[in-house]
Image (cartoon, helix red, strand yellow):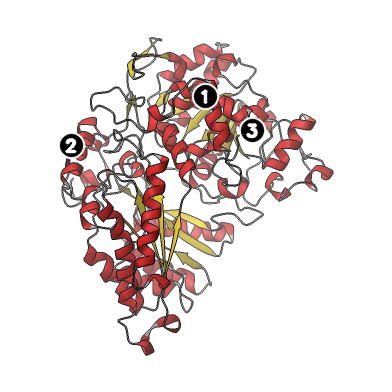
Amino acid sequence: MKKLALSDDILLKVEKPARYLGNEFNAVCKDHGQVDIKFAMAFPDVYEIGMSYLGIQIIYDMLNAREDTCCERVYSPWTDLDRIMREKNIPLFALESQAPIKDFDFLGITIQYEMCYTNILQLIDLAQIPMLAKDRTWEHPIVIGGGPCTYNPEPLADFFDIFYIGEGETVYNDLMDVYKQCRREGRSRMEFLEQAARIPGLYIPMFYDVTYKEDGTIASFAPNNPNAALSIKKQVVTDLSHTYYPEKPVVPFIKVTQDRVVLEIQRGCIRGCRFCQAGMVYRPNRERDLEFLKAYAVKMLESTGHEEITLSSLSSSDYSHIEELVTFLLDECQSKKINISLPSLRIDAFSLDVMSKVQDVKKSSLTFAPEAGTQRMRDVINKGLTQEDILGGAMDAFKGGWNRVKLYFMLGLPGETWEDIEGIAALSNDIAALYYTIPKSERPGGGRVDIVTSTSFFVPKPFTPFQWVAQNTNEQFLEKQRFLNGKIKDQLNHKSIKYNWHDVELTQLEGILARGDRRLGPVLLDAYRMGCLYDSWSENFRYDLWMKAFERNHVDPDFYNLRERDLDEILPWDFIDAGVSKAFLKREWEQAQKGVVTPNCRAKCSGCGSKIYQGGVCFEGKN
C-alpha cells in the first residue's frame, strides 16, 4: 500500500481529508519506475470543483493510455492544509502516487477563470518549483497551461514555460514524443522548448518580446527565437466521434460540484452572442455522433455507478439529435432510477416536455437567461431571443407545473440605457403576472410564483466583438444595481420577485486580468505574496491587497478596464489565431452598435473564419 504524503495527525486537522487521499475508483496508478514521462495534471481550486471538470478527465485518460506515461492529478490545497504544508515544509503531491510534484516531468495546469490566478501561483510555490519560468532548469517540471484563459495568457506569461492554445486531444502526444526524444538525446531544456515551439498550438512566452508606446499601449509583439511562430493557431478536434473520451471516469470519494456522469454532446455554439467568449473561441460548432453518445452513456454509467447523467454543451437544444438522445436516455435510465440533467436548454415546448419527464413529480426551478431586459438590448448582444420567446416559454412552464423561475441578466452591457435596465424589472414582473393569469385552482405550488432575478456585471473578454469597449466603473455598476433594485420594488408583483446581484470589486479584477498584458505579472506575484488566494471565494477575496499590489508596481488598473481601445490597437492576444478573424469581430461590433442581429450559423454563414478547420457546422450537409 502506498505511503500517504500527509500523516494521520495532519489529516485529522484539516477539513475534508478525503480531498488529499487519492485511490478513488477508476483512478490510474502506475509504477513510476516503469514509465518515461510523469505528468501531473492540476486544477487551481479545491478537489470538489476540480473533479467536476471534464477536460482533466479527458487528458488524464488520454495520457494514461500511453504505456510510457503516467498522468496523475493534483488540486489546490484548502487554506488549512496550505498553512500546514508551509509550516512543515511538505511539498505539493499528486493524489495517485502521493509523490512530490517537483519530481514529475510536467506540471499541467488548467486555467478556467481569471480569479484562480493566485491559486496557480500557490500550486507552483507549494510544489517548490521556481515561480518564474526563466529560473527553472531540468531539475524542475515543465509548467504548461491550457484552458479558456489561455486565449489571453499574457498576465501569466512570467510563470509558464508553455501555453497550449486549443483542445488538448490534438498535440499533447506530439509534445510527449518530443520531450522523450530530447531527454534520450541529452538535449538542454532550452533545446526542448525550441522543439516544442515548432508544434502547432504551443506558445512559449520567453520566445517573444513586447515593447510599449508612451501611452502604455503595445508598440510591438515579436518572436526573439527563430523557432517561434509569428502566430499561434488554436488547435481543434474536427471529428469528436473518433477521439479520446473517458469510458471509466474517476469517481470521487466525497460529494463534488458535478457528482454525475458528464456526457459532452457537442463543442462550440451556433448562436454568436456577442458577449460570450466561449461561443467565439470554441468555433466551429461540432457534434458528437448519436451512436457514440449512446454507447458512452451506457459505459460510463456502468463503470462509475453514478445515479445521474448530464448532457454537457453550451446550448444543448441546438444538438441535432437531442430528441433521439433524450428518448434513449429516458428508456435506459428510468428503469435504473438514474436521473437525467439537461442544462443549457432553450425553453420551448419540446424542452419542457422532456424536463417534465425527467423531473417526475418534484419539479425544480427553471432557468431563463434573457441577459438583457429589452428587445433592443438583446439585439445589440445578438442574444437571439424575442419577448414572445421568453413569455411564451414561461407560460408553457407554468402550465407544465413549474412555479419557480430563475432569470439571469447582465448590467453594464455596451450601449445600455436606463430604459434597458428598467426593462429587467418590467420583464420579471411580466413573467410573474403571467402566472397569475392562470386560474387559482390550476396553479402549481399552492398558487404563488417565485421569480429569482439575478444580475452579473458585464466583463469584456478577448476574441469577442466587445473586446475593445470600456468596462463600467465600480460606481457605475453600483448605481445601476441600486436603480434596478428600486425599480423591482416598484413593480406590481414585487413580492413574487427576489433580486440577487454579484460583487462589483471581484468584477473589476476579473476585467483587468481578462484583458491584461505581461506588466501584470509582478502585480500577481505581489498580491499572492501578500496573501491573496482563492479570490473567487468571496470570504477570501482581498480587494485592498490587490490595489496595494497595483500601487507597489506602479500599474494603473484603470488602464485595462476603463479605456475604450482603438480598433487598430495591438491587443495582448493578437498573436493568437483563435479561428475567428479580427475583421469578423470588428464587423460584429459595428452590427452591435446598429442593433442588427446576425443569424445563427445554421441559418446563414457569417464568415467568422472558422471554416479553415474543415469541419463542424460549416460543412453540415456537404460531401
Residue found 32% across the figure and 83% down from its top = 438
Left or right: residue 273 versus residue 33 is left
Give the structural element (helix, strand or loop) at label 2. helix
Q: Quadrant of the N terminus?
A: top right
The residue carrying pointer 2 sits among few (fewer than 14), some (14 to 19) or many (20 or more) residues within 10 Å by Cα, namely: some
Residue found 38% across the figure and 33% down from its top = 561
Left or right: residue 311 versus residue 599 is right
Q: Quadrant of residue 386?
A: bottom left
Tags 2 and 3 touching, CB below 8 Å: no
Give the structural element (helix, strand or loop) at label 3. loop
Q: Residue 357: x, y in percent? A: 41, 75
Q: What is the number of the mark on residue 551?
A: 1
Pick out the residue farthest to the right: 9
The residue carrying pointer 3 sits among few (fewer than 14), some (14 to 19) or many (20 or more) residues within 10 Å by Cα, namely: some
Residue type for callout 2: Arg
Is label 2 or label 1 in front?
A: 1
Which residue, given by chain and number where applicable, does mark 2 sit on? 587
Residue 396 in view (yes/no): no
Sequence-wise, the earlier of marks 2 and 3 is 3
Residue type for callout 3: Gly
